[in-house]
Amino acid sequence: MPEESDERYLAAMEPSVRILTELADSIRQLSTAMPNVGTQGFAEILSDDALTSGQQGHTSATTQSLSGLALMAASDHVRAFARLHSAAPAPVFAHVTLTRAALEALVWARWLGEPGPGVDPPERRRRGLAARLYSTFEEARVPEARDVANAQATRLEAVAVANGWAVVGRHRGNLTVGGLALPSIPDAFSRLLVVPVERFGVTLWSHLCGVSHGTLYGLLSGVVESDVDPLDPNVWTATLGGDSHSVNTLVLLLLRGIRLTTRERLTLMGWKSPEWDLADRNADELERVLVRALYGIDLP
């Protein structure tokens, strides 16, 4: 990408950089360990009993903490995404990888920390236990960690049995705990859309994975212009870069994902944050601008 194009691109990204940074920084301040008295989160902790608590068990508080950890990871990725667009040269691939990492973490954070009557204390514990089991099964694929991870999985499976939940499968696509499956990443991506597009989540997921894994089709998405060398028809030249539509789409997904997830965590825990409220209002203005630019519609 020519230097002058870099400068124009980064200047256009300045509002997004500022607001994404504000959101990420305000989330870092949400470090209160316990939910407030009288909230759903507090009631869940009170419901923990001898069956689910203790070193060998799994508590609602553990699930709440795992949700918070995933949200903090997402905010870290979002902050890095913003920093990549703060100075030349403009990124071609790295911001796509960070978007994937942020959105994946947000899927876990939302699933583990979803508030509302549809998630009672046993359901909260079951989701957290499923996430921990999946983690141990993945860790067990590392030869050096296999014995310790399998031993941990055995302990967690015993907790599931004690709660009446059968554990079936070991992989993301087939693992269930008491019939509960893990959240679908593509489906979660699709729910962040303003305008529904069939199979968008699958397409987006494939693109983000392609870039992150260095797969050729993913890397070729960074080629914005190519042509045959006039002196040798067997040689092609290519220019790498990005377009505003695709980058703004990623910014919009990050905005919607992190705002929704943080709001739900504040609801569950009963926390208040003036810093977050201000960042959220600023993000709402940017989101409206992006939706108008990308889809030609106004949000209600």
Image (tube, grey):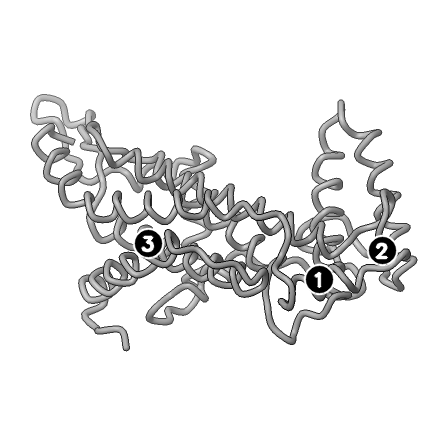
Q: CA distance from mark 3 to mark 2?
A: 37 Å
Q: How many marks?
A: 3
Q: Which residue is mark 3?
A: 279
Q: CA distance from mark 1 to mark 2?
A: 11 Å
Residue 6: give x, y in percent of width and height.
14, 33
- Amino acid found under the numbered disc labelled 1: Arg
Residue 151: give x, y in percent of width and height.
87, 36
Mark 1 Cα within 10 Å, few/some/many (few <14, many 20+)? many
- Closer to us: 11 or 284: 284
- Can you say whether 182 is above or below 227 in the image? below
Mark 3 Cα within 10 Å, few/some/many (few <14, many 20+)? many
| Disc with the residue nearer the chain's start (1 vs 3) | 1
Closer to viewer: mark 1 or mark 3? 3
- Closer to us: 193 or 230: 193
| Disc with the residue nearer the chain's start (1 vs 2) | 2
Q: Quadrant of the N terminus?
A: top left
Mark 2 Cα within 10 Å, few/some/many (few <14, many 20+)? some
- Amino acid found under the numbered disc labelled 3: Ala
Q: CA distance from mark 1 to mark 3?
A: 29 Å
Q: Which residue is mark 2?
A: 52
Residue 236: give x, y in percent of width and height.
19, 29
Q: Quadrant of residue 114?
A: bottom right
Left or right of 192? Residue 10 is left
Q: Secondary structure at mark 2?
A: loop
Residue at the (21%, 28%) spot, across then down: 89
Which mark identifies residue 97? none
Q: Which residue is mark 1?
A: 124
| Disc with the residue nearer the chain's start (3 vs 2) | 2
- Closer to us: 147 or 65: 65
Closer to viewer: mark 3 or mark 2? 3
Q: Secondary structure at mark 1?
A: helix
